[in-house]
């Protein structure tokens, strides 16, 4: 018999029985009653600060915040009385009193939790006129993110995410009272902070206070330039989430429609970053095998997540020797467009403009790093997030859901299932193992699935027998989990040979550039598993499931020479820097 104590209470007259310790908010959900929230994020930001979730509890002297108030035996709760509704409405009207209310042109129009609640509660947005002490000038100092405090409601969801999920903690509340504002310490701008560019703060913000730095106009300018050959390619995780922007269920793979939309926008070539992922595996698995055979630095750590790379450079620069020197799939893809593809097609790389569609905000910063210009020109010219692509599709009047399925161009639209799964935590490791195991054993892998390292746990470990050798691997996603692995390695307590780390929890499918889901969906739907499922399903249906089986790879190495050789190194590998923490 379970020894969990059960509590009986009534919510709006409905009998509910829940385990002790449950909050009123969670108990209400069991009773089929929704209580609105704004600041609340389960397990991350449970501060009861915004007071939108207030409810009446019989016998209590004042209304209580349902998100943090625990149930008790015999409790009687009312969530929808006139008094409760009036209190919530007043709170919203106070929030709106110093809010820059330009919904029509706001990036979050129709996807804003403040706007939705204000509408539901019939708020008079101008009942109170607050004198805003928030700065009018957004922080536009970085190449990837814009912070606009005139839209900030001080919910602190971004602060908690940066601090607890990513353990970066570069933003917090400055000043007090009316002057409170969310910023870096000492009112410093984001550029002068050790922000890793993950964009996770954007994804959790309920309003339009945070967004990526837009590059849509750069892309439009290139498309209008007759001199330019404009190439586009999307990362694996984009196809698993773009459909959400057009009302499709979470986890719908819209690869074919996305290809057609990209063609209709006017791109000259529609390739795929999955091809770059296959290339990464060829170089990375070769690097791993060399380290294992020649006593190189182990564990080798993957380097395809640019937020993670920045984190390592800021916080664990002593691990630089462990890092794979491979560029990320995005950068390998761009480098090959302007070298291999340019030469093959007789196009001057200076006239090639490469656009990638990314689930990520850090990719915008990555393209500007040193050593990312193999042809003498930037490997990548513009990066659009999944959200920016959706905006562009809508602006062009393309009826996405009615589009026919399109086919990618060759040769760099060819990819294996291993390339597809890069978008989910564990996918890079699985893809690398599919190739490394075959190379080390010299035998064909009958079953290329390494299911032990799939799933959404923050840290996963597995040990494989490969050619008489024990290979212990670790996979971590989200920087708080990465930190655990890094500390083990730093302190000499890790016995891994190979480590995959992704900056965002769950991997790229949950990147900072993906469609924004409201707090209710984020806590009640396993959206990461659904998005990852779309990628694993595509992988399982592919005839080619290993990167080294991609037929275009051979042609690329006819151009590059030896895997890991001089030319491959010059085009496909990179260097890291020790960053100052300020
Ligand atoms: S943040 Fe929300 S309420 Fe504010 S302007 Fe934008 S859409 Fe409107
Ligand atoms: S981008 Fe990431 S590191 Fe930077 S402020 Fe946002 S959550 Fe923090
Ligand atoms: S920036 Fe967004 S998430 Fe952060 S405190 Fe303001 S409203 Fe909340």
Image (spheres, rainbow, N blue to C red):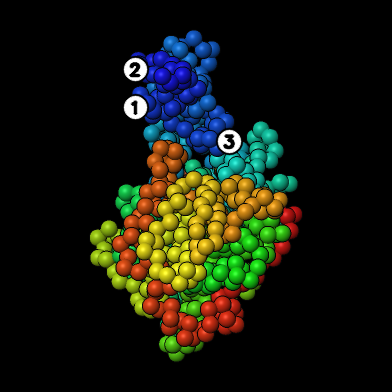
User: Left or right: where does residue 51 sit relative to residue 2?
Assistant: right
The residue that mark 2 highlights is 14
Which of marks 1 and 3 precedes in the sequence?
Answer: 1
Residue at left offset 60%, top offset 46%: 480
Query: Which residue is nearer to you in this view: 460 or 349?
Result: 460
The residue that mark 3 highlights is 130
The residue that mark 1 highlights is 32
Query: Which residue is nearer to you in this view: 518 or 99?
Result: 518
- Res. 512 visible in picture: no
Q: Where the C terminus falls, by quadrant? A: bottom right
User: Left or right: where does residue 132 sit relative to residue 22?
Assistant: right
Which of marks 1 and 2 precedes in the sequence?
Answer: 2
Q: Where the N terminus falls, by quadrant? A: top left
On screen, 373 above or below 428?
A: below
Disc 1, ligand 1: is the CB inside 8 Å?
no
Residue at left offset 66%, top offset 33%: 177
Disc 2, ligand 3: is the CB inside 8 Å?
no
Check residue 421 in the rendering and tell me which mark sits there, or answer none: none
Outermost residue toward the front in this view: 468
Identify the element where label 2 is drawn: strand
Task: Assess disc 2: are there few (<14), some (14-19) or many (≥20) residues with their C-alpha within 10 Å of its C-alpha.
Answer: few
Which of marks 2 and 3 precedes in the sequence?
Answer: 2
């Amino acid at each position: 018999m379970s020894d969990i104590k059960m509590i009986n209470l009534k919510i709006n007259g409905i009998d509910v029985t829940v385990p002790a310790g449950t909050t009123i908010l969670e108990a209400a959900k069991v009773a089929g009653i929704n209580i609105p929230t704004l600041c609340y994020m389960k397990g991350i930001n449970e501060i009861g600060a915004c007071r939108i979730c207030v409810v009446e509890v019989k016998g209590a002297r004042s209304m209580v915040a349902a998100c943090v108030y625990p149930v008790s035996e015999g409790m009687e709760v009312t969530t929808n009385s006139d008094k409760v509704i009036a209190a919530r409405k007043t709170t919203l009207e106070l929030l709106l009193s110093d809010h820059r209310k330009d919904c029509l042109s706001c990036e979050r129009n129709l996807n804003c939790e403040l706007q939705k609640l204000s509408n539901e509660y019939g708020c008079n947005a101008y009942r109170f006129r607050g004198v805003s002490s928030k700065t009018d000038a957004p922080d536009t100092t970085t190449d990837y993110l814009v912070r606009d405090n005139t839209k900030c409601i001080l919910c602190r969801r971004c602060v908690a995410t940066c601090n607890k999920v990513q353990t970066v903690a570069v933003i917090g509340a400055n000043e007090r009272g009316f002057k409170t504002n969310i910023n870096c310490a000492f009112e410093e701008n984001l550029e002068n902070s050790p922000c890793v560019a993950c964009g996770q703060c954007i994804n959790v913000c309920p309003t339009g206070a945070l967004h990526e730095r837009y590059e849509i106009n750069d892309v439009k300018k290139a498309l209008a330039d007759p001199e330019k050959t404009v190439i586009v390619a999307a990362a694996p995780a984009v196809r698993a989430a773009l459909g959400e922007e057009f009302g499709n269920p979470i986890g719908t793979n819209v690869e074919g429609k996305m290809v057609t939309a990209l063609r209709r926008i006017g791109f000259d070539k529609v390739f795929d970053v999955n091809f770059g992922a296959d290339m990464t595996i060829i170089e990375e698995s070769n690097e791993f095998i060399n380290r294992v055979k020649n006593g190189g630095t182990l564990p080798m750590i993957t380097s395809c997540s640019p937020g993670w790379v920045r984190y390592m450079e800021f916080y664990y620069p002593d691990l630089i020797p462990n890092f794979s020197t491979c560029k990320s799939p995005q950068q390998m893809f761009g480098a090959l467009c302007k070298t291999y593809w340019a030469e093959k097609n007789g196009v001057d790389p200076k006239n090639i403009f490469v656009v990638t569609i990314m689930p990520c905000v850090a990719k915008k910063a990555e393209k500007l790093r040193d050593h990312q210009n193999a042809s003498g020109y930037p490997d990548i010219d513009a990066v659009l997030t999944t959200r920016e692509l959706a905006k562009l599709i809508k602006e062009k009047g393309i009826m996405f859901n009615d589009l026919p399925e399109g086919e990618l161009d060759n040769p760099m639209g060819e990819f294996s299932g291993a390339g597809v799964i890069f978008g989910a935590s564990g996918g890079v490791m699985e893809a690398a193992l599919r190739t490394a195991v075959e190379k080390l054993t010299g035998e064909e892998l009958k079953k290329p699935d390494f299911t032990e390292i799939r799933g959404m746990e923050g840290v996963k470990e597995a040990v494989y027998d490969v050619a008489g050798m024990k290979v212990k691997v670790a996979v971590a996603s989200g920087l708080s989990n990465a930190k655990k692995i890094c500390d083990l390695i730093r302190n000499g307590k890790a016995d891994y040979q190979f480590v995959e780390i992704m900056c965002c929890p769950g991997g790229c499918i949950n990147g900072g550039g993906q469609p924004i889901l409201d707090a209710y969906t984020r806590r009640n739907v396993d959206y990461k598993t659904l998005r990852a499922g779309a990628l694993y399903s595509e992988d399982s249906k592919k005839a080619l499931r290993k990167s080294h089986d991609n037929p275009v790879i051979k042609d690329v190495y006819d151009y590059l020479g030896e895997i890991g050789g001089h030319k491959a190194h010059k085009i496909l590998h990179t260097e890291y820097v020790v960053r100052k923490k300020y």
